[in-house]
Amino acid sequence: SKAEHLATIFHCRGGGFSLFPQVVREGYEIIVNTIPEGELIDEQWILPQVVAMDIVYAPQNTPFLIKAQRKNCTLVYGYRMFIAQAIGQQQIWFPDRDCSQVLQEVLSKEIT
């Protein structure tokens, strides 16, 4: 329901596994895995050369992203979202300090 609500804001479609047969026929530009069990997403549901994002940040190469890589998708790793969230939080709490570069470097080393 959260994915569906968010999708209406951005004028697109969001949802769960039940959407796959239809969206695979119609096509899509981006697919986002939001569950820890990325292996549940059947490789046949991943269209070639779309953007594939996994919000799981460790391991970097999740089962979902490995499947997407085989389909020549543009990959967006979960750790990138994690870092962006940390930088956003830092900017909210400490708007007068820009530590984004330091956070980027430190978190990239720790997560990847």
Image (tube, rainbow, N blue to C red):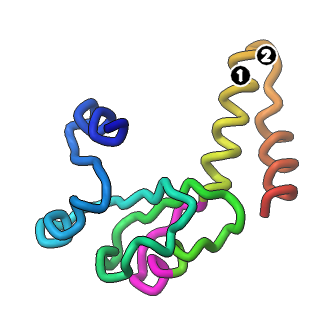
Q: Residue at x 70, y 44 (%)?
A: 83
Q: For the residue marked with disc 1, what is the amino acid?
A: Gln
Total numbered badges shown on the rendered structure? 2
What span is in magenta? 67-77
Q: Nearer the viewer, residue 87 or 17?
A: 17
Estimate the x, y position of residue 51 in percent, counting from the top left: 40, 64
Mark 2: which secondary structure? loop
Identify the amino acid type marked 2: Phe
Magenta-drawn stretch contains 23: no
Residue at position x 18%, y 67% in the image: 27
How crowded is the residue under tag 1: few (<14 C-alpha within 10 Å), some, or many (20+)?
A: some
> Left of 18 or right of it: where is 36?
right
Percent across and percent down for residue 55 are: 56, 54
Q: Are marks 2 and 1 in contact (CB under 8 Å)?
A: yes
Q: Is 53 on the left-hand or right-hand side of 58?
A: left
Q: Position of residue 52 (x, y in %)?
A: 44, 65
Residue 91 numbered mark, or none: 1
The extreme top residue here reads: 96
Q: Quadrant of the N terminus?
A: top left
- Which mark is on residue 94? 2
In the rendered structure, the answer to whether residue 102 lies left or right of residue 85 reads right
- Residue 17, percent across and down? 30, 61
- Circle 2 packing at 10 Å, graded few (<14), some (14-19), many (20+), is few
Residue name at image x 79 percent, y 25 percent: 98
Quote the CA–CA distance across marks 2 and 1.
Answer: 5 Å
Classify residue 29 by image quadrant. bottom left
